[in-house]
Amino acid sequence: MGTKIAACPFCNSHRIHVAHCLLSYSVSCETCKCRGPHKRELSNAIEEWNQISNKVHHATIMEEPILQSHLVNLEHAVRNLTGALRHEALNPTTHQSPVAVHNH
């Protein structure tokens, strides 16, 4: 039985590809195109990919409340910016700079 390959650590896709290039193997994601390190042995390439995936997944779980807070702040900023742009589009101000006229 083969070793199970973890989902992509960055996009969580299961569209994983194992490549053999010259003297090394690497695991990559076909969805987001990230690639794991090249290793001489296939089992080492898969093991490294799985370790990276597990570490990123664990970090995401641990950081989720902080990330949620940042996302909420970002959503508020986008809403404020959208409102300001909409207001500007509905109430354009005429900011005309004086034009110098030269008579020759």
Image: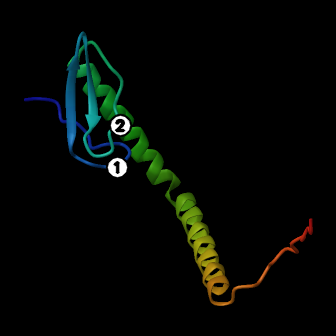
At horizontal 20% and vertical 29% (from top left) the residue drawn is: 18
Q: Is the Cβ of the residue at disc 1 closer than 8 Å to that at disc 2? A: yes
Residue lying furthest top = 23
Residue tagged 2:
34
Residue lying at 36% horizontally and 40% vertically, measured from the top left: 54
Give SS at disc 1: loop
Q: Marks 1 and 2, how far apart in space? A: 9 Å
Residue behind mark 1? 11
Quadrant occupied by the C terminus: bottom right
Give the amino acid at mark 2.
Cys
Q: Residue at x 34, y 29 (%)?
A: 36
Residue 88 in percent (x, y) is at 67, 83
Q: Is residue 95 left or right of residue 43?
A: right
Lateral position of residue 59 relative to residue 82, left or right: left
- The relative height of residue 20 versus residue 32 in the rendered view (above or below) is above
Nearer to us in this view, 82 or 54:
82
Q: Count all numbered tags in the image, as a single digit.
A: 2
Q: Is residue 89 above or below residue 32?
A: below
